[in-house]
Image: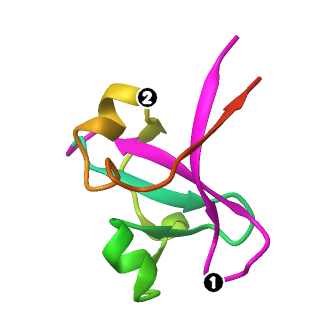
Amino acid sequence: MSCHFHAGLCPGCGQGRLFLYRSADTGTVYGHCEECEWGYRSPDRLAARDGFLTLLDEEDAEPANEEDIRRSAWANSRIFAVRE
């Protein structure tokens, strides 16, 4: 059973969950909306609605795990687990 983590609803579209991913190149954890494809590099950028279109980002990414999140800017954010 795998587990994915999200930081609530996307502030941009208000419909998709903001799943946390880790960049394969930099190791940075960022939020990625499952609906509108916008990303946010930190909770501060999320609050300011300062995002980027993830479809234009050429870096590979994988779902962030608990350890990735603990070491990231998202560590003190409210995070929800989704088990598949």
Numbered badge on residue 12: 1
- Residue 1's x, y, as percent? 70, 10
Q: Secondary structure at mark 2?
A: loop
Q: Is residue 63 left or right of residue 11?
A: left
Whether residue 51 appears in this view of the structure is: no
| Nearest the eye: 1 or 25 | 1
Locate the C terminus by quadrant.
top right
Q: 16 above or below 73?
A: below
Identified by mark 1, the residue type is Gly
Label 2 Cα crowd, 10 Å radius (few <14 / some 14-19 / many 20+): some
Residue bearing mark 2:
65
Q: 40 above or below 66?
A: below
Q: 46 above or below 32?
A: below
Q: Secondary structure at mark 1?
A: loop
The alpha-carbon separation of the residues under discs 1 and 2 comes to 24 Å
Identity of the residue drawn at 74% across and 78% down: 14
Within the image, what quadrant is residue 25 found in? top left
| Nearest the eye: 56 or 83 | 83
Identity of the residue drawn at 41% across and 56% down: 77
Q: Residue furthest top?
A: 1
Numbered badge on residue 70: none
Q: Check if residue 53 falls in the magenta segment.
A: no
- Magenta region: 1-26
